[in-house]
Amino acid sequence: MSFKLVKICIFLLFLNSWSYAQNQYPHTKTSGDIDLHFGVAYPDPYRWMEDIKNPEVEAWFKEQANLTDKTLSNINGRDELIATWKMLNGLENPRINSRDFRGGRIFYRKTLPGESVGKVYYRNGLYGEELLLFDPLAFEVGKTLSVSSILPSHDGKYVGISYSENGAEIGTLILVDVETKKVLKERFSPVWGGIMEWNFDNKGFWWGKLSSSDNTNEGALKNSKVMFHTMGQDPKMDKEYFSNVTSPELGIEPQEWPWVFVSNYMPEYIFAEVSTVQAEKRIYYAPISDIHKPKINWKTISEQKDTINGVYELMNGKIYAATSKGAPNFKIIATDAAAPNWKNAEVIVSEKADKLDNFIRTKDYLVLVYTDGINNTLFKYHPQTRVTSQITLPYSGTGFVFNLDKKSNTIFVNMTSWSKAMQEFEINLDNNQTQLSKFNKQNVYPKEFEDIVVEEVEVTGHDGVKIPLSLIYKKGLEKNGENVCIMESYGAYGSSMTPYFNYASTYLVTKGVVLAYPHVRGGGEKGNAWYKAGFKTTKPNTWKDFNSCAEYLIKNGFTSPKHLAGTGTSAGGILITRAITERPDLYAAAICDVGCANTMRFEATPNGPGNVPEFGTVQDSIECRALYEMDGVAHVQYGVHYPAVMSVAGWTDPRVIAWQPGKFAAAMQNNSKSGKPALLKVNYDNGHFTEDINVAFSNYADQLSFMLWQCGHPEFTKKPNQP
């Protein structure tokens, strides 16, 4: 297509969008911006939105937010939904997470029922008296802060706590003296993730410094560096320890993340990592004696070609790692830490029919976690005896496994499923004895929560492949096509749609709503091959699998196109925007929640370059075309009857910048001919996520109310006399 023809098309699009634009929407201009890649012209009529600090752009977002807030406030059922969730939240026991046991003390974040965010506590010993250490809401009066990470020193005398405001993630690191509970004067920013690790002498630590605290700055997440801080020293004097500047010979790219740590299990070395979203990391090491040398001579443990898939443990002078090489469901191999040789690595545990999800170490064992896509099974491997044996779990479901003290053989397992609330157990690996944990007790919910059916089926995809589909619905459901159904999936990074209990969603099931979770390609339910079948050039399988599951639900009477909604979050924005642009006839409503909707321009965002290994780059002719296929904005066509759509943007979001879902909302408003609403919700009080439960309730209620309203649920209607 010539530039002249493209400009004419854009001009006609501009005129048509003007003639059809709904009066209730703020005016959205279009421009003649065009990118030329490998001889192909790609129009970008909403490029002007990328200047997100421009007053005109800010005003446009604010107008959109006001319109959406007004619309959503006029939906019956929304406020009742929030009130019910708050009641259910009040039934919960305190939630304890982010636990770390060091220096004879356990540190953790705990959230009480009704609290908006968690506070940091500690105990002397695992079960000593609980003591409050840090309250983020009392730290800076008038600001909504939440704790991002906690890491105590090895002796348990100091704790590094990172926090951010309004869900921004990019935040500040502080230090707290545990005995006095005083916050030290040092401040470290901008950070994402807090302290990487403390030195063994507890006199210093490594932390990651970002290039900018501005989540809209395209370079904010580029050229990050590892700094070393000496306790009592002005942070301005901190040494740049590991980066593309200190180690140019390692070829650390601007978008890659450097990391440094030490391990009590191999104290003779210091370790470094370089990574992106790609599972395969580059890992380096050096003698601990080199720890403060002006120049560290890093030696290679693994390169990306070694396919060490991000999971490894150090034990008895060996490195145990998971690899997909010759094993799509992963196997565990080991090599000598002093002289790594992955080509001749020993196979410790061979590939199984189920996928190896992860593994951890204890004092004497490796604990292996497998999944069939729905349920987990556990095994323990003893390196001395080389025996692998199964660990019996209390019941079938998802098991999140961790240990607090690697000098012991006790592990903790949080068990849950689609229909069972989370329950925590302790397992002694020496005798396989299981008991309820003293930390997190199981929550008890109303009786009607027991009237839930979970059905696992397989759907034939567009190319004959069988796609797992999880269905949750109320007992006695009539398959008459009249049920409201909400379908959600993700399909990226090899991450699975892991079954878990959520009282907010389950409450909808008691109201007759069907919940559907397709396990699409691009996820990890069926191993590495399943992941790679929804990756870059094969990415269309992700949304085609989603649409195949929609067809199954309709054909089998679970719902119908006028009652079906789809939703996708973050990378799931690719899934949902392409699902509805390819098959708009299947859906009544859709949510693009902080979703990546404009993949052709994702590299121009702060988080985009680091995601090139997952989605591709416009600098490669094949990957560029694949990015175009993924691009929801680029596939919105004028005059199509699209479902009702709500795009959601987090104003402080560093992962998916607000203009990504903003562009999709604009394209829908200017082009859809269905007459159904196309809204843009802007969350000014959170980013990609939020810990603040009140903010989360409001955001989630808005999304669900919108879908239930558009899908015809009788309890979610427009209030009388409202436009």
Image: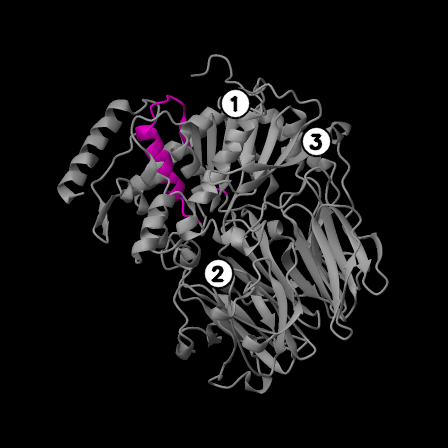
Q: Is residue 248 above or below residue 719?
A: below
Cα distance in 3D space between marks 2 and 1:
38 Å
The C terminus lies in which quarter of the figure?
top left
Of labels 1 and 3, earlier in sequence is 3
Residue occupying the point 75% across, 63% down: 380
What residue would you read off at disc 2? 278
Q: Position of residue 337 (x, y in %)?
A: 61, 79
Q: Nearer the viewer, mark 2 or mark 1?
A: 1
Under circle 1, the secondary element is loop
Give the farthest residue toward the front. Answer: 464
Give 183 or 476, whichever is nearer the viewer. Answer: 476
**Range of residues picked out in magenta:** 656-685
What residue would you read off at disc 3? 453
Q: Is residue 343 above or below residue 20?
A: below
Q: Residues within 10 Å of mark 1 (few under 14, many from 20)?
A: many
What residue would you read off at disc 1? 560
Of labels 2 and 1, earlier in sequence is 2
Q: Is residue 674 visible?
A: yes
Q: Position of residue 279 (x, y in %)?
A: 52, 61
Please name the amino acid that badge 1 sits on. Answer: Ser
Cα distance in 3D space between marks 3 and 2:
37 Å
